[in-house]
Amino acid sequence: MDPIVKEFKVPAAPICPTPPQLDEWMSESLNRLIALLKEHTPVSRPSHHSKPWWTPHLTILRREYHKAARKARESDAPHMREVAGTSKRGYFKAIKAAKNKHWSSFLLTATPQSLWTAKRFAYGRAQPRFPSLPGAETPVQMNRVLLDHFFPPKEPFSQPPRLRPDRSAPPLTTDEIAAALSKCSPTSAPGPDGIPYSIWKQVNKINPSILLHVLSPLVLLGYHPASLKGSNGVVLDKPGKPSYESPSSFRIIVLIRTISKVLERIIAARLLAAARIRGLVHPNQCGSLPGLSTYDACRTLTNDVRTLQRPRLKVSSLFLDIKAGFDNVDNKTLARILREGGIPSYLVSWVSSFLGERSCTLVFQGAPGTPAPVNVGAPQGSPISPLLFLLYVAPLHFGIPRGLMISYVDDFALTVASLSYRGNIRRLQDLFDRLERKAARLGVSFSVAKTEQIHWRTPSQRHSPKCTSPIQIKGELFHPGNAVRWLGYWFTLPLDPAAHFARRLALAQGAFALIRRLSPPGAGLPPYLCHRLATSLIAPIPLYGADLFTPSVGTTNRLDTFWRNVQRWTTNCFSATPTGILSVESCLPPVSLLISHRQRLAALRVVSSPPSVNLATA
């Protein structure tokens, strides 16, 4: 394929074209390139019915079993039925033995690459739920109900009659393309064209001018062509829902063409840099931004709670969630926000073109497979959609005297302080009304069912009566809780870490119960692969939140007990082996050292981040 790719020439793009002309040029260029790649690239198509554990001996046993069963049906003699039963039992017993032998051989010869395949087998895969919606009896009706829910009809965004290059747009460089490709995983699911990232990485390595000449006109003209707007929408069920008779119990992950995602990453990097310079990203926004994580949001929350409690004020928080956030991004409103914020015109034009006149083909069991027009929302699965959503909801933020508003993508937390909890409730209700009015102007709303409230307490208040007064949100009453889960962290009234680590430990024990089957005593995976599973899969579960919370002595002892079981499993040591030897032989440090290491890394990252970027540093 190397000589053919080196000789491939992209035809020159039209100058000052109309949108249909640029669409035609892009379609012809991509179709020629993709046809060439598919012609000279071997395709691996493993059969779903292949059985790697099958042996020639099983073929003989199956033939004998079918022969004996056929004779038993024809003669109906008792001795023939007995022979058929004996042959059947021997055949299925041999199948079971072959599966066990193949599984043991697979584990013994496992490599770091096939290790995660073994983990997937151990975890199993839940069967996707088939949408069962009231009033939708056929797949065509279900397809229409899902489309109307996630992509309601809306007036399409008008395109300019003729595209003109923006001379202020910096030219696209091969370094930008290489940087975007380096962040792309080769295992990501491809879009409708079936071309994975690995193909584009190879193409760019052989002939960097191909992607440069294909994508440069799109950046210069601020246009996203129609051939890159088609996508497949995979319908997935949300786990843990009490009922699956509503479209809101499902979500749609959009699979876009990988070459389109490369361009989206380039535009996202440019747009983020321009937005930060012009102050369009609020300092209290976290998530989907480089250098920020859930730790930063939760660290800021706990720090402000403790700071407000020092002058003996009562502190309360209200946790909110934007309903169907990405699906409610309005193209015209976002373009106005970017334009008024001083974003370069070519970026505003590209974003408007990217969000307008898209098409999506829903994928579920029995789906008709017909593309439907989409003129609303930012596609989930696109590299630039999280950034577009952050810029869209940034105007929702406002300052709170003696309080704080922080957000992580679509999760908002309002914190206030006053002389009484009842005063906090009144303040939170007023703040929510103000926030809801601002959200209505953007066309978004908050999910009432996910609203939670908590009244923080200090250790000295443990014997004082708790405030049980509810807050009224949209006509519904929400009583304060004793524990709140936000961004994976469990917060209790006095910010006691015991509740958080108890839940993390339970999750870790469940995961370890599944993983340990991969290496029973004296068999299974070699120790170095068990060590890799312990460090990369098991350890992050109980230690999640250790950067924010410091466990008590009793909690640390319980974590140590679990971790010693993991060390014994890794080394196949006896239960009476001294714990000091376990840590050395398994190359797994004690829990206390792992927690201290995580806290040092978190502290180092906070102190080295600029205050203008990281609100935890500020």
Image (cartoon, helix red, strand yellow):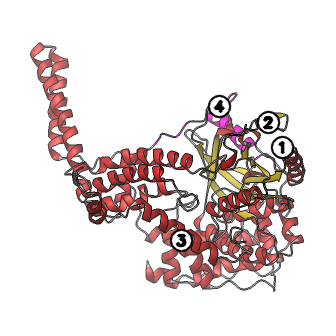
Magenta span covers which residues?
Answer: 126-153
Is 482 on the left-hand or right-hand side of 151? Answer: left
Badge 3 vs badge 2, beta-carbon distance below 8 Å = no
Q: How far from the left and from the top, in percent, is residue 111?
A: 30, 63
What is the spatial separation of the Cα atoms under label 4 and label 2, in whole angstroms? 30 Å
Q: Which quarter of the rendering shows the N terminus?
A: bottom left
What is the spatial separation of the Cα atoms under label 1 and label 3, in whole angstroms? 37 Å
Identify the residue position indicated by label 2 in the image: 470
Identify the residue position indicated by label 4 in the image: 245
Residue 504 forms part of the magenta stretch: no
User: Which numbered disc covers residue 601?
Assistant: 3
Is label 3 or label 4 in front?
Answer: 3
Q: How far from the left and from the top, in percent, is residue 144?
A: 70, 39
> Where is 565 relative to 256, above or below?
above
Identify the residue position indicated by label 1 in the image: 425
Q: Which is nearer the N-term, disc 3 or disc 2?
A: 2
